[in-house]
Image (tube, grey):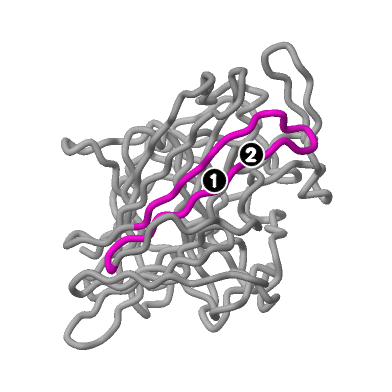
Amino acid sequence: MAERETQQRQDEPVGTPAAGSRAFQIRFDDYRAEVVSTGAGLRLLERAVDGKAVQLTESWPAGTKPPLSAGLVLAPWPNRIRDGFFYFDGIEHQLELTEPARNNAMHGLVRRREWQLEEHERHRVKQSIDVRLQKGWPYPMRLSVTHELDEEGLSVTHTATNTGPVPAPFGLGMHTFVRAGDAPLDECTLELAVGVRQPLDPERMLPEGPCVPVRGTEYDFSTPRSLKGVWMDTPFSSIDVDTDGRARQILRAPDGTATALWTDRTFRWVQVFTADPARGQAYPDRGRALAIEPMTCPPNAFNTGIDEIVLEPGETWSGQWGITAL
């Protein structure tokens, strides 16, 4: 997969203190999760099986920044905006370049900020944040995220409300690293319910040409395939939704245990990323890792208009995704 040969993610380093971050634990039966206030990040999700904690997501040491922005909310846009520039409703906007090596604005405005606690019960926690006016972003919004556990595992509900006087562009994603217990990634299989992929320019990781079908190609994971030697940082769409209105992407260990990440119909994209320490993409004590990232739109959507959400003044958008053990 050629996109993997030159690409490296350039997020926060491992081990840097996350100053001021608070942690909130939630439980339901065999499930336990921990959510932090910085970036509203999902730091931990596990399920007890025969008295042993089985990890469903990658974790990181409490009080430090997550490697590769793991678990953080990406809004009011996910992924990248070319040159930090976009044109909306007749106005040009120039955002801060938060990925200067590629001259892009990356992953929105809230992943490094402190979210405010709204509610905390034994099985759920709700946090919110106000997106204020800043360089290149004249669209105030209020975002909320609720992490909740039940007998099926974790469900995460996002809302976004346009609190300003004019229409506003919007997109949202999550940097969710999943795992199937302690099984090394190269011993696991991946199954994706997707139909097309968006080719990316390997230098800037921005869309290059139209989407292409995955069936019959090296990107075809319609049936479970080994992840050994697989490298991706690839946006997928044409997501296949089950009869219950959810799409499921499944990571399975050799013993048959599996972790499924599901999304509702509001998430029309999923980006799959394989991290490797050999490429400077370290994940503590785990080696290679897999991110399955729900997203409402592809990279550079504010310029292409592909699946860009427009919120009218006072309008609220809502979407949901989750993780369950199979």
Q: How many marks?
A: 2
As helix, strand or loop, the secondary structure at mark 1 comes to: strand
- Residue lying at the far bottom in this picture: please name it: 51
Query: Which amino acid type is shown beneath numbered disc 1?
Result: Thr
Q: Is residue 122 above or below residue 40?
A: below
Q: Position of residue 35 (x, y in %)?
A: 45, 66
Q: Which residue is mark 1?
A: 234
Between 113 and 49, the one nearer to me in the picture: 113
Q: Is residue 8 above or below residue 77?
A: below
Quadrant of the rendering where the C terminus is positioned: bottom left
Residue at left offset 44%, top offset 29%: 316
Q: Which mark is residue 323?
A: none
Query: Which image quadrant is residue 324 in?
Result: bottom left
CB atoms of marks 2 and 1 within 8 Å: yes
Query: Which amino acid type is shown beneath numbered disc 2?
Result: Leu
Q: Is residue 50 above or below residue 136?
A: below
Few, some or many C-alpha atoms within 10 Å of disc 2 (few <14, some 14-19, many ≥20)? many
Residue at left offset 64%, top offset 46%: 107
User: Mark 2 or mark 1: which comes first in sequence?
Assistant: 2
Q: Which residue is mark 2?
A: 200
Magenta segment range? 122-147
Q: Is residue 164 above or below residue 189?
A: above
Measure how far apart labels 2 and 1 are at the Cα level. 8 Å
Residue at left offset 29%, top offset 42%: 247
Q: Position of residue 158 (x, y in %)?
A: 42, 44
